[in-house]
Amino acid sequence: MTERGKSLPTIALEELAGCAGELLVILENLDQLLPFARVLRFRFGQSRNDTGPVDISFVEGSVSQPHDLETLKLIRQRSKMVIAVGNCAVWGCVQGSCAQKYPVPEMLRKVYGDDTHIDSLPSAGIDNYIKVDAKLSGCPINATQLLAVAASALRGHLPYVIQKPVCLECKYKENVCVLVEQGLPCLGPVTAAGCGALCPSLGAACYGCWGVCEAPQIDAMTSTLTDKGYKYEEVRSRLTTFGGSEKLFGRDETSAAGASCITAE
Ligand code: SF4
Ligand code: SF4
């Protein structure tokens, strides 16, 4: 209960298949949430957990096995609002990218041999399976963005998450563009902002770990990089490493590769 006798909103911090990076960010910042919310479930961070309904569930990780799917459906049933946190939950991340490129049975055989009994699904973001109210990307998520999203959700509002490209944050910082000036394969123009343009601020190319921004200009990005000498397949691989859908590539792969592929030095 709050000082004024009103019940605090309840939250759950849930995990599917992921590396717990988001849960660590949440744990590090939990002291700022605790005055405004009651944590009913957080298996990563506390030993006593409740199974009841909650106002908001934050979900980390992708659906990669059948039990993830069962857990996710239960989370949806027990939550008024579901927020996907982190690239795994939003996009499927690296494991989702692999599942788009290779059939799951083939990957299982190569890694575990013919005699495997592992039950695995093609990894994917959680909105492939349930209704998601808000998505907060990042690998891992940014603490300031998390607290802003949580502040809206705890007041019962749908959170707004910026989906502009990393280039915007990069220009705010007045960085020299590593794509234009050094020819590095920076994916800032098609990657969602939120990290504060971390990599270009240190002179490195963005490799897209935040996932795709809104309305990404994939064809323009591809042409720019192939014109700079990067192979089409390499560009495509970079663009989809963190779970960006292969469907983003609407044009014919063979003709696009033939038209613009220049062998990188
Ligand atoms: S360095 Fe990358 S993120 Fe920064 S402006 Fe250039 S392309 Fe955009
Ligand atoms: S790879 Fe791109 S999105 Fe990820 S931290 Fe670096 S600049 Fe940010």
Image (cartoon, rainbow, N blue to C red):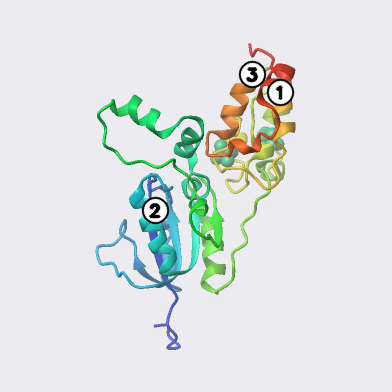
**Position above or below: 106 against 247:** above
The residue that label 2 is drawn on is 69
Q: Amino acid at mark 3?
A: Lys
Answer yes or no: disc 3 within 8 Å of ligand 1: no
Q: What residue is shown at x 72% (from left), y 42% (from top)?
A: 171
The residue that label 3 is drawn on is 231
Q: Earlier in the sequence, mark 1 or mark 3?
A: 3
Indicate the position of residue 213 as horizontal and vertical percent values: 65, 45
Q: Amino acid at mark 2?
A: Leu
Gap in Å between the C-alphas at discs 3 and 2?
A: 37 Å
- Mark 3 closeness class: few <14, some 14–19, many ≥20 residues within 10 Å: many
Instruction: Give the quarter of the image for residue 55.
Output: bottom left
Gap in Å between the C-alphas at discs 1 and 3?
A: 11 Å
- Determine the secondary structure under disc 1: helix
- Determine the secondary structure under disc 2: helix
| The label number, if any, that marks residue 62 in the structure image | none
- Who is closer to the viewer here, 29 or 135? 135
Indicate the position of residue 261 as horizontal and vertical percent values: 69, 17
Quadrant where the image shows the N terminus: bottom left
Q: What residue is shown at x 63% (from left), y 11% (from top)?
A: 265
Indicate the position of residue 111 as horizontal and vertical percent values: 33, 27
Q: Earlier in the sequence, mark 2 or mark 1?
A: 2
Pointer 1 with pointer 3, Cβ within 8 A: no
Q: Dividing the image into four equal quarters, which quarter contains ligand 2?
A: top right
The residue that label 1 is drawn on is 256
Q: What residue is shown at x 35% (from left), y 31% (from top)?
A: 108
Q: Amino acid at mark 1?
A: Ala
Answer yes or no: disc 1 within 8 Å of ligand 1: no
Please name which of the two marks, 3 or 2, marks the residue nearer to the observer. Answer: 2
Instruction: Give the quarter of the image for residue 8.
Output: bottom left
